[in-house]
Structure formats: structure tokens, C-alpha cells
Image: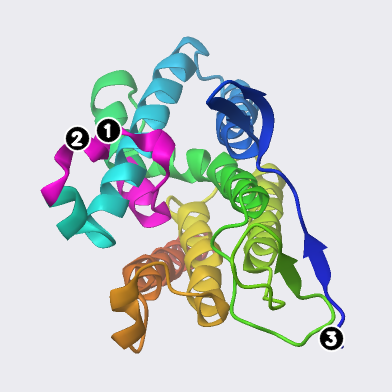
Amino acid sequence: MISAIVWDIDPVIVHIGEWGLRYYSILFAGSFVVGWYIVQRIFKNENIPLKELDSLTTYMVLGTIIGARLGHVIFYEPIYFFKNPLEILKVWHGGLASHGAAIGLLTALYLYTRKSTKKSYMWTLDRTVIPIALAAVMIRTGNLMNSEIFGTKTDLPFGFIFAHIEEKDPRHPTQIYEALSYLLTFILLMKIYWKHKGLLPKGLIFGVFLIGIFATRFFIEFLKTNQVGFENQMSLNMGQILSIPFIIAGIFLVYRAIHKKKSVETAQE
């Protein structure tokens, strides 16, 4: 018999009638709280007025939720939601897409830089993606608690049997794979920022973030079950296809930042 880890965690912490408080909800909300403290340290380091932080947080919260929901609607179940438009508003029923959240955040942060700060768009991205990487860790942990977005069948000893799904075969705990990979990306971003106190070529941290998050996502998708039926007919699933532009953008930004740094160093010699 194949050894495996039985995952039998109730995703709901507290039941109050038909309503329940989920681990996912706490981790999702907690990611913004932790992110607020990280950005606060960064703002203090660079003498940015902390009053701008509240405005930034509002933009990020709205951008994340709206983008993640619309991303799921557009990328994964457009026909269903076209027929049931009111269901789009029922976020509590589930259905959030990380790529949609990324697009929503990029849009929200662009609007933030236009209205609320004298700093450039890339300056803002280089700082905000640091806590966003940690938020990705917390969200994937929430997915684990929900027994969702799991992997394909495996005979490895660390496979998980998810007790709350119909099939009881051991599966890759891809939520853990992603969470650990995103944690390494977060640690790397923090190390890069604090080693140089933020004095880096614009776009470098953002580029490293894009490569670390979306390249990881691309490769781990090979071990994951498809979220919707139409992906079964695809060589690459929707998550992988949507990751490719982010990976390319990350490589370009890192290359450009390194090239600029070398050009400055050469000019100073």
C-alpha cells in the first residue's frame, strides 16, 4: 500500500449557522495586514510620508479582489458567468484567479502613482511586489486548507490524500510546492532590497518577482489538475499560457536593469 499523508482539515474554523469563517479568509485578509507592515518599513527607510500608505493599501485591496474575480470570470468560466452575471458578485462562492489579481494590481498601482505619489510607477512596483510575494504564500496556504488547486496522482511518500474530495488517491500537494517557492522568492526580494537599501536600478526587484512567481507557477502547473474542463484539450493549461507574458516581462526588466547598472559603472570609471 502506498504511504501518504491524509489531509482531513475542516476549511471552516468557526460555524455560525450557515455562515463559516474559513482559514482562507483569514489568510487572505492577513496578507494585507502583513503587507502593510512591510511597506511601512520600506516607506520609513526612504522617508516617504506614511499617510500615503493608507491610500496605497486601498488601491491594492480593491485591485486584488476585483482583478482576481474578473480574471476567473474571463479566463476560466466566461460562458457560465455570461449566463449568470449576478454570480460574479458572489465572491464568497469561490473563484479567484491569481493572474487576474496580478493584472488588477498592476492597474490599481498605476492609478495610485498617477494620483497619490510623486514616485514613478516602476518605483512603486519594486516595493509593493515584496509583500505581494508573501501574500502569494498565504493564499496558497489557504488553498491547502480548502483542499483545492491540488496536484495529479502520485506514488511519492509525501503525496496527500485529500479527505474532502471524492477521489481518495494520493496527490501532489502542489499548494505546498507553490507556497514554498513563493516564500523563497519573498526572502530573495527582501534580501535584495535591504542589502542595497532600495538603491537599485528601477525594475530589478519587479523583474525578479515576475520570474520567481510565474516561472514557478508555469512548471508546477505540469503537476496540477486542470481547474476547468476545456483545459484537458490543451498542451499548456490556462495558468501556464497566462504566465508566459509575465515571465518574458520579468526577464526583460532584469536584463535592462543589469545593463543600466553596468552602463553607469562604466561611465564612472
Which residue is identified by label 2? 86
Q: Amino acid at mark 2?
A: Leu
Q: Nearer the viewer, residue 138 or 83?
A: 83
User: Within the image, what quadrant is residue 33 found in?
Assistant: top right
Q: Nearer the viewer, residue 51 or 244?
A: 244
- Name the residue located 65 percent from the left edge and 30 percent from the top edge: 34
Position of 8 with respect to 214 (left or right) is: right
Q: Separation of disc 1 and disc 3 at Cα?
A: 43 Å
Q: Are marks 2 and 1 in contact (CB under 8 Å)?
A: yes
Which residue is identified by label 3? 2
Which residue is identified by label 1? 89
Rendered location of residue 203, percent (x, y)? 43, 53
Q: Is residue 57 above or below residue 233?
A: above
Q: Amino acid at mark 3?
A: Ile
Position of 125 with respect to 115 (left or right) is: right
Q: Circle 1 — which element?
A: helix
Q: Residue furthest left?
A: 83
- Whether the magenta-drawn stretch holds residue 47 is answered as no
Q: Nearer the viewer, residue 152 or 167?
A: 167
Position of 67 with respect to 209 (left or right) is: left
Q: Circle 2 — which element?
A: helix
Q: Amino acid at mark 1?
A: Leu
Magenta region: 83-104
